Image: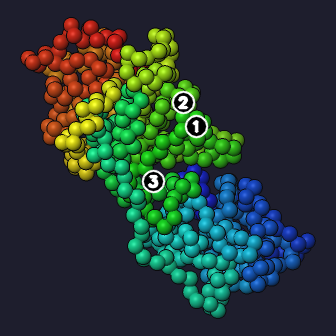
Amino acid sequence: MPLASTRSVALTGVRGVVIEIEVDIAAGLPGLSFTGLPDVAVSESRDRVRSAVVNSGFGWPAQRITVALLPADVRKSGSGLDLALALAVLAAAGEVPRAAVAQTAWFGELGLDGRLRPVRGVLPAVLAARAAGVTRVVVPVSNAAEAGVVGGVAVAGAASLREIALALRGEGPALSAPSSRAVPSQAPLPDLVDVVGQPEARRALEIAAAGAHHLLMEGAPGAGKTMLASRLPGILPPLTEQEALEVTAIHSVAGALPADVGLLRHPPLQAPHHTASMAALVGGGSGVARPGAATLAHRGVLVLDEAAEFAPSVLDSLRQPLESGRIVLHRSLGQVEYPARFQLVLATNPCPCGAVRAVDCRCRPDTRRRYAQRLSGPLTDRIDLRIAMNPVSPASLLDEFEQRESSECVGRRVRGARAASSARWAPLGWSTNAEVPGSLLRERPWRPARRALASLDFALECGRLSARGFDRVLKLSWTLADLAGAATPTVDHVDEAVRLRTGLPGAGVDGRFDRSAGAAAIGGGELDG
């Protein structure tokens, strides 16, 4: 019976679903029809596949061809099914052995001349095939290095449909596995040693890296906000094997994976322009939504420079991902979920005129207030650290003897703090302090001593902190303790965390919180949401 089947993978977001492709050739008017929810790209493959088969030197059946894409209730999109479809037709027509075609998963786009073209999403496709028990996968040669990083499955690369067909018939060389040549490393990251002055901001950047906290920097133009933000990935720990697979799969689906890089080992950095739309930031598009910058920054850093220039609605679209670490987009063809656990860094000027010195500002008070309010309260309430940066002094710029720490030096302390937090939280399913629910940190044995919470209690009483802010200060306190090598947060750690979050002064020399100084500071900070 002229019936053949094989397998491929359809992508939904960054997840792959193994698809069984059945082809039946029967008497009737010549033509090819699909069942199983194909999208436009899949439906148009009938013309690509026919031309590719004919131009590869094989005959096209002059009969009715019916293609079933199973499971039938899963929508299939993209051109990655072309190769599997062509081989299933050839197998049903008796041109290639049916058993050999059925035992392998095929993934690739066909040109009209039969050449295999690279496609997006090869890494998640191979991961899905492995999870489904597939032991052999064939992809275009250009994607072979990407597919080869997945262990537990045999991967081969091919350049054309004819090459594959001849190999299956035993008339040509066997399909080759991806070469084991050295994979080029990613470009070196910018170094913190280039940043002049700004010791408080450098300290805040280190704390943010150690605990995976979000950071807001406000300061005059040229103060170093952008330089600091771009150097955050350089002090973060390298991605673990699982994280590297996640990040590489996302960039593969988005078509943003550099050629021949293999796994991405550094935390990614995304810095969209302030004119970016909501779809560009969180994902979108018609049909099946594409990932946005927030997803591409998964396990890395999302920098929004000139944050107050972004549309407020675009900024507020990040509120839910900051809490949940994922983005769920609903479209006419269904919903798709993308991971989005990133560190957010906001950098903004204090006013629209961009004066370097406050005394030179030409903005009216109401103008400055409206500019600051473009960062909404609910968004800034989710930011753990808020730093006001002063202009760099001439003495700092010209100081030839200033000792500035490199990213490697700071990164060692960050890795030590991350190791301490991971050892503490790993049994509970977390790795960084920012991931831990605040409700847990308010309970024994994780709650700091009552005496250490004086400044935190006062900040909550006077309205400087919300309940969410209270929990985030506790997370900051644990990060400060990890950096100091302490077993639990002390008065000094909590007071510094309150100051970094709100700008309120800390404890006095006797260890007691200065309520009069704290009361005087209420309402005086422009960074408070």
Which badge, 2 or 3, comes first in the chain's sequence?
3
Question: Would you say 28 lies left or right of 520 here?
Answer: right
Residue 432 position in % (x across, y down): 30, 42
Residue 93, image quadrant? bottom right
Residue 246 position in % (x across, y down): 45, 54
Question: To which residue does mark 2 refer?
Answer: 310
Q: Amino acid at mark 3?
A: Val
Residue drawn at x 62%, y 59% as measured from the top left = 10
User: Mark 2, mark 3: which one is toward the viewer?
Assistant: 2
Question: Would you say 321 lies left or right of 403 here?
Answer: right
Q: Amino acid at mark 2?
A: Phe
Question: To which residue does mark 3 refer?
Answer: 247
Q: Are marks 1 and 3 in contact (CB under 8 Å)?
A: no
Numbered circle sitting on residue 5: none
Question: Would you say 290 lies left or right of 428 here?
Answer: right
When the figure is inspected, residue 90 is found, relative to residue 484, above or below; the finding is below
Residue drawn at x 85%, y 72% as measured from the top left = 64
Numbered circle sitting on residue 276: 1
Which badge, 1 or 2, comes first in the chain's sequence?
1
User: Which quadrant does the N terminus fall into?
Assistant: bottom right
Residue drawn at x 48%, y 14% as measured from the top left = 363
The colour scheme used to paint the residues is rainbow
When the figure is inspected, residue 71 is found, relative to residue 516, above or below; the finding is below
Which badge, 1 or 3, comes first in the chain's sequence?
3
Residue 87 position in % (x across, y down): 69, 76
Depth order, front residue of 72/157: 157
Secondary structure beneath dot 3 equals helix
Q: CA distance from mark 1 to mark 2?
A: 7 Å
**Res. 8 in view:** no
